Amino acid sequence: MMEVKASMAGSVWKVTVKEGEQVQEDQDIVILESMKMEIPIGAEDEGTVKEIKVAEGDFVNEGDVIAIIE
């Protein structure tokens, strides 16, 4: 099991995957908007998205868990 965490504080601009979807290493999971920049947060390894813990428009802090991948 792998936790995908926010690398910085910001608002979730877009969720690019769905629960149950297969993802590849470095595939974008969400796009954060911070300081008028779009920052993609990707998977560190391949697997299946078990849970997405954020929704578009949510605010996250650095280190918050965004998704869980198995």
Image: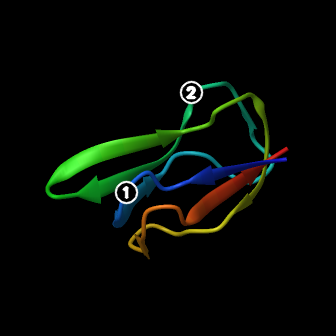
| Kind of residue indicated by mark 1 | Met
Residue linked to disc 1: 8
Q: What residue is at 19 percent from the left and 48 percent from the top?
A: 37
Residue 43 appears at what percent x and percent y? 62, 36
Q: What residue is at 52 percent from the left and 61 percent from the top?
A: 63
**Looking at the picture, does residue 25 appear above or below residue 7?**
above
| Kind of residue indicated by mark 2 | Asp
* Horizontal relation, residue 36 to residue 64: left or right: left
Secondary element type, mark 1: loop
Residue 39 appears at what percent x and percent y? 33, 44
Label 2: how many Cα within 10 Å (few below 14, some 14–19, many 20+): few
Q: What residue is at 26 percent from the left and 46 percent from the top?
A: 38
Q: Mark 2 or mark 1: which comes first in sequence?
A: 1
Display colour scheme: rainbow
* Horizontal relation, residue 8 to residue 21: left or right: left
Q: What residue is at 43 percent from the left and 51 percent from the top?
A: 7
**Image quarter (top left, top right, bottom left or bottom right) of the C terminus:** top right
**Looking at the picture, does residue 20 appear above or below residue 52?**
above
**Looking at the picture, does residue 63 appear above or below residue 18?**
below
> Toward the viewer: 62 or 48?
62
Count of number-bearing discs: 2
**Looking at the picture, does residue 29 appear above or below residue 65?**
above
Residue linked to disc 2: 26
| Tag in front: 2 or 1 | 1
Which quadrant holds residue 10?
bottom left
Which quadrant holds residue 24?
top right
- Residue most extreme to the front: 63
Look at the numbered discs 2 and 1 and tell me whether their residues touch, using CB distance below 8 Å: no
Secondary element type, mark 2: loop
Label 1: how many Cα within 10 Å (few below 14, some 14–19, many 20+): some
* Horizontal relation, residue 59 to residue 28: left or right: left
> Toward the viewer: 51 or 2?
2
